[in-house]
Image (cartoon, helix red, strand yellow):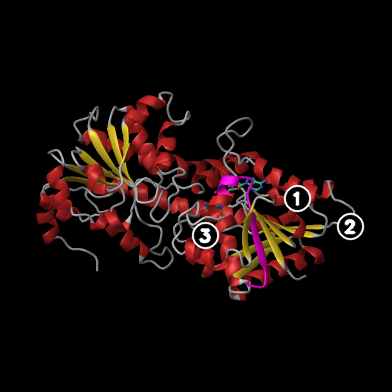
Amino acid sequence: MVIEKICCLGAGYVGGPTCSVIAWKCPDIKVTVCDKSIERINQWNSDKLPIYEPGLDEVVKECRGKNLFFSTDIANSIQEADLIFISVNTPTKTIGNGKGRAADLKYIEGAARMIADLATSNKIVVEKSTVPVKAAEIIMKILRANTKPGVEYQILSNPEFLAEGTAIVDLVESERVLIGGEDTPEGQKAVQALCWVYEHWIPAKNILTTNTWSSELSKLAANAFLAQRISSINSLSAVCEATGADVSEVARAVGRDSRIGPKFLEASIGFGGSCFQKDILNLIYLSECLNLPEVAAYWQQVVSFNDYQKNRFTRKVIESLFNTVSDKKIAILGFSFKKNTGDTRESPAICVSKTLLDEGAKLHIYDPKVETDQIYYELTHPQVTNEPEVARKNIEIHSSAYSAVTGAHAIVLCTEWDEFKELDFKKIYNVMMKPAYIFDGRKILDHEALINIGFHVQTIGKRLSRTSSIRAQGSQTLP
Ligand code: NAI
């Protein structure tokens, strides 16, 4: 089966970049990315794309209007497509059974019903969203219960492993593409058709095929493993602070073991983003439903520890500032959940900022990519506060780090943007209140240099004091 036209439902952080790269690498395929949000599609068709990803603008500019289209005409796109990606959001349920843990599959179901209503020819339907194991069965049931005569469906699982901030590189140089399908001749034909699309640029050895359920579970498992590494190193960061060990040195020593490896061993204020917490909660809920409470408890600890780490850091900020931040001006540097993205979903900066606001602080926030309205939204919506006007009054958004820190009692660095390493901290020290504090939640600054300027510095996983530079000179470090 040859794929000539692809439709993608959902023009978000996954659907947009993934399909842009497919269009770029497969000039023989027409790719249409659809969304029910007119605003989002208008942004994809404008000069300012709705998401920031290094390299994305260039890819979109090259393909848009040639073989890449962004459209709200879902009906036509579904009807003409041979293959449809479902790339809609799968948030955690906020009400009802499984509230706070189970994935809300209403958008997946909605997409499946749309396809069932509109399709008039055979389709390969590809689940790209991250879903609980057996979600493909839901899609299959809806499609097959509503099939029109002569229309047949194959459902594949093809989870996306891109990371925000490096999405384009991740897609272009994928370490692995995972495709799960039914173990029937028709199912395997569909798997081969999707393999053919990826083989336009991915070496065949990097394309793994499995059964549908293994593919679905592998995505949850991959995110659970990654998050678990972060919680593991963060747990050791607390031990380091209590003992005088340095978590970066511990990570370097541990990561030299090829069985462990050096990646994802950076201690910080905790993980964020739309996926890690949601996907682990999903795995926890699944384990509970399968009557595996020990499995659920194991993974629950990864999420609980992340909350502990965010709170531990914020407590440290407050305690260092004489246990009161009321009416103090605090500069928050970085609001996105990690560098090189404007995405704020589950950003640790939200938790830190909310606690400081609750304690009466005046926050002066700067992030190079997050929109002002987005910051206000994250800190004033009803689930965060029932006094949005008070919160709003205590937040000021700045267009540069220098303006955010002027007159501040403390700087709280929440995101590891490279530009923060280049700041002129002597200049910053001179415009801050004294004693001037810096809390480096990402361990990216030169702490010795800051201490020498006169700052009081605190970070994750390392005890620092004004005399630490003298101690460090005499200490042994790993090569
Ligand atoms: P998103 O929220 O940015 O985008 C989803 C889009 O789907 C929204 O624009 C929404 O309007 C649209 N939508 C919902 N129902 C629709 C329908 N029936 N027809 C057309 N459009 C519809 O979500 P994001 O971040 O792109 O995530 C999508 C999925 O991919 C989720 O399951 C997520 O867990 C998974 N994922 C996300 C990654 C990330 O880094 N953001 C990485 C890997 C997987």
Q: Can you say which quadrant of the picture contains the N terminus?
A: bottom right
C-alpha distance separating marks 2 and 3: 36 Å
Say whether marks 1 and 2 touch (CB < 8 Å).
Answer: no
Say whether marks 1 and 3 touch (CB < 8 Å).
Answer: no
On screen, residue 330 above or below 173: above
Instruction: Based on the picture, tell me whether residue 212 belongs to the magenta stretch.
Output: no
Q: State the residue in front, 90 or 210.
A: 90
Per the image, the residue denoted by label 2 is 150
Q: Identify the magenta region.
A: 27-40
Per the image, the residue denoted by label 1 is 115
Q: Position of residue 401 (x, y in %)?
A: 26, 48
Q: Please name which of the two marks, 1 or 3, marks the residue nearer to the observer.
A: 1
Question: As drawn, is 70 to the left or to the right of 152?
Answer: left
Q: Position of residue 192 (x, y in %)?
A: 72, 70
> Which mark is first along the chain, 3 or 2?
2
Q: Amino acid at mark 2?
A: Gly
> Which mark is first along the chain, 3 or 1?
1
Say whether marks 2 and 3 touch (CB < 8 Å).
Answer: no
Describe the element under mark 1 as helix, strand or loop.
helix
> Which mark is first along the chain, 2 or 1?
1
Q: Amino acid at mark 3?
A: Leu
Dot 1 alpha-carbon crowd within 10 angstroms: few under 14, some 14 to 19, many 20 or more: many
Question: As drawn, is 169 to the left or to the right of 86?
Answer: left
Dot 3 alpha-carbon crowd within 10 angstroms: few under 14, some 14 to 19, many 20 or more: some
Report the disc number at residue 162: 3
C-alpha distance separating marks 1 and 3: 26 Å
Q: Is residue 190 visible?
A: yes
Cβ of mark 3 under 8 Å from ligand 1: the answer is yes
Q: State the residue in front, 359 or 32.
A: 32
Q: Position of residue 165 (x, y in %)?
A: 44, 58
Residue at x-position 33% and y-position 54%: 417
